[in-house]
Image: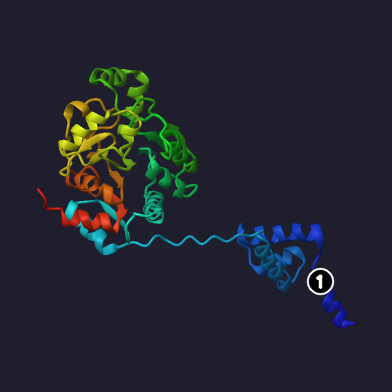
Amino acid sequence: MKEDADRAANRLPVDEARDHLMVQIARMIYQQEKTLTDVAAETGLNRWQVSRLLQEARDLGVVRIEIVPRTLRDPELETKLTRTFGLRDAVVVPGSVESAEGLEGVQRAAGQYLASVKPRPNVVGVSWGRTMGGVARWLPPGWNSGVTVVQINGTVTPVPGIAHHNDVADAFARKGNGRMIPLPVPAIVGERTTREVLEKDRIVADVIAVARSAQVLAFSMGVAGSDSVLVRSGNILDNEMAALVRGGAVGDVLGHFIDRRGEIVDPDLDARAIGLSLSDLKRRERAIGIVGGADKHQVALGALQAGLINVLVTDEATARYALEHSHDR
């Protein structure tokens, strides 16, 4: 009789009722963080039955456990960067970003860094692009509460594979339980007078004013040459880019093309860029530059040399390049 009672105690419900119980127990364990003993008491099961149902839930895919390792960092290189360039902070991911996995590591590190900023900023300014799109994906939900996310540079016409301003800023805002403010104008216009007229418009002026109030900015950097998204989108003509490269341009920061020292290469063309200026970047509590890859070594160096960023999130190869060339003239 006792053996029959023991067998009955270990017998579990079947079919649909069993499935419902499996989901209920999984939620109690993984979402409500209850113990096996707590779950057993509430469901009328014993601990063995609860454990068995949990294992079955994992086997059937009802419960999926994803392990996301903390981003590895190189503290020695980070210290050297902060001392050499007077940075507030640096995050260096080992290796290089010449693979998709490497770039993802930098994007993940940037998302984690932004989520760790304390006190939480009320206003955050962001740029757009593939790198920033990746950062947005790695931002944890609830990274902020009620944040205003404002676009800090003008946009481009759609280019395949490039995350645009609304995608990035909207994702930042949604995950931060806040609102997004777009900057609905081109990154670079055809004439200086056009930029002046647009920036006098009340709507555009109000957005730029909000951008200038943001004490935390997060932005990526672009390359110089035919691969520049500003060329591919038509914001800059081929002959204009060729002239920039001849003049020493190594890339752009928010549409401002700089040389290895971080100085503007073509002031006339620069006067056609809409958004925050390079001088605006130097007055921010945190100007976070997110960059990696061999094609962006020199623009990263220029941004560091000119003090355009005070927080750098990058890969090991870019960090070493910047340190090796920190005394270049």
Q: Residue at x 69, y 66 (%)?
A: 56
| Residue at the outermost bottom position | 2
Q: Identify the residue shown where x is 36% and y is 27%.
A: 207
Q: Which residue is mark 1?
A: 11
Residue 177, above or below 80 = above
Quarter of the image with the N terminus is bottom right
> Is 3 in front, or is 320?
320
Residue 94: x percent and y percent?
Answer: 32, 61
Q: Which one is nearer the viewer's eye here, 46 or 77?
A: 77
The residue nearer to you, when weighing 45 against 329, is 329
The image shows residue 96 at horizontal and vertical percentages of 32, 57
- Locate residue 147, reporting x and y percent: 43, 39
Residue 311 appearing in the image = no
Q: Residue furthest right?
A: 1
Residue 311 horizontal/vertical position (percent): 28, 49
Left or right: residue 22 versus residue 282 is right
Q: Quadrant of residue 204?
A: top left
Question: In which quadrant of the rendered view does residue 39 lie?
Answer: bottom right
Judged from the image, the secondary structure of the residue bearing numbered disc 1 is loop
**Callout 1, which amino acid?**
Arg
312 above or below 254? below
Give the tally of numbered discs: 1
Q: Is residue 245 at all visible to an observer of this figure?
A: yes
Mark 1 neighbour class, 10 Å CA radius: few under 14, some 14 to 19, many 20 or more: few
Residue 317 shown left or right of residue 328 in the figure: right
At 25% from the left edge and 64% from the top edge, which residue is drawn?
Answer: 76
